[in-house]
Amino acid sequence: MITRFAPSPTGPLHLGHAFSALKVWEAAQAANGTFLLRIEDTDSTRVRPEYEALIYDDLAWLGLTWPTPRRQSDHYDDYWKVLDHLQHQGLIFPCSCSRRMIEAAGRGYGPDGPIYHGACENRSMGEARPTDAIRLNIAKALRLLPREITYIDTGSKVTVDPTTLVHTVGSPILRRIQTGDPAYHLACTHDDALQEVTHVIRGKDVAALTPIHVMLQTLMGWPIPIYHHHDLITDDDGKRLAKINKSRALTTYRAEGLTPSDIRQMVGL
Ligand code: GLU
């Protein structure tokens, strides 16, 4: 078993991250497998080096160890090779639509935010500008996909009719607008394949994005890992802990003198 914890250094780790990291760690230990740490630092507008440093400190403090982490920002060329491959298949297009424009088109919201209305779908890659987003053309992708895609999530078989993604997501983003950074779906699925991750263990907050990932894996011929989406740690009001909530940062608890076993107890492990 190879599994991974893949935080984004856009804020300090909080109790929810500790819970997730420990779940991943324990699964790897129980199977005598490998625990990988991956730094998902592709959102250049939000990533900060001090948060990356805190990830290493907090996880080491919790007692975890890992081989050299993969930092996604060091590997943009890998992600552009995936785009080249998809471009050769005629599956991607440049898009200049802002979030506001997509929202104004009124298709509503899905698991990946406002549902894309397809305005740029007929543009060719020849006219792509560096500030354009790049999207996967969902209609064209459907022609190459089987009628059903299946994967295991939390012990059950999930069957998705890929045509439903037209209505729930639209053409998913692969390269971000303005910054030109690789988008999460692209970098995450590429790296899970490259790192031969067999078990993806992560929070339920991203469970609804997994069909997008499985679609990309299918198009790229990558193996489909086994997924497990664990419960989320909530605060006293039942609200999901956000990174914004600095008071619940692990570093704060560390500074207050709590121990890793206190943290385990707080998250119910
Ligand atoms: N970087 C993502 C996050 O922090 C990782 C999600 C995943 O494990 O795929 O939410």
Image: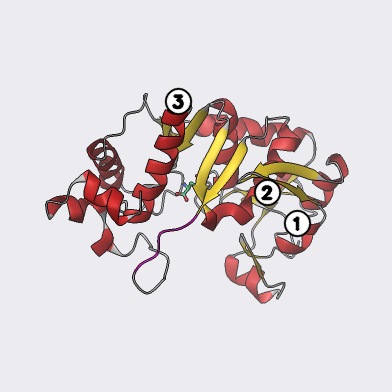
Amino acid type at mark 1? Leu
Q: Closer to us: mark 1 or mark 3?
A: 3
Disc 3 target residue: 34
Residue 126 falls in which quadrant of the image? top right
For label 3, being within 8 Å of ligand 1 is answered: no
Please rate how many residues cluster around mark 3, counting C-alpha atoms within 10 Å: few if below 14, some from 14 to 19, many from 20. some
Q: Position of residue 226 (x, y in %)?
A: 62, 37
Residue 23's label in the rendered image is none
Disc 1 target residue: 165
Q: Is there CB contact under 8 Å for labels 2 and 1?
A: yes
Provide the secondary structure element on which disc 3 rests: strand
Evaluate whether residue 16 shows in this view. Answer: yes
**Residue at 87% in and 44% down:** 143
Write the start and end of the magenta stretch as one range: 231-235
Q: Position of residue 56 (x, y in %)?
A: 28, 37
Determine if the magenta segment contains residue 234: yes
Tell me: 254 left or right of 130.
left
Amino acid type at mark 3? Thr
Upstream in the sequence, badge 2 or badge 1?
1
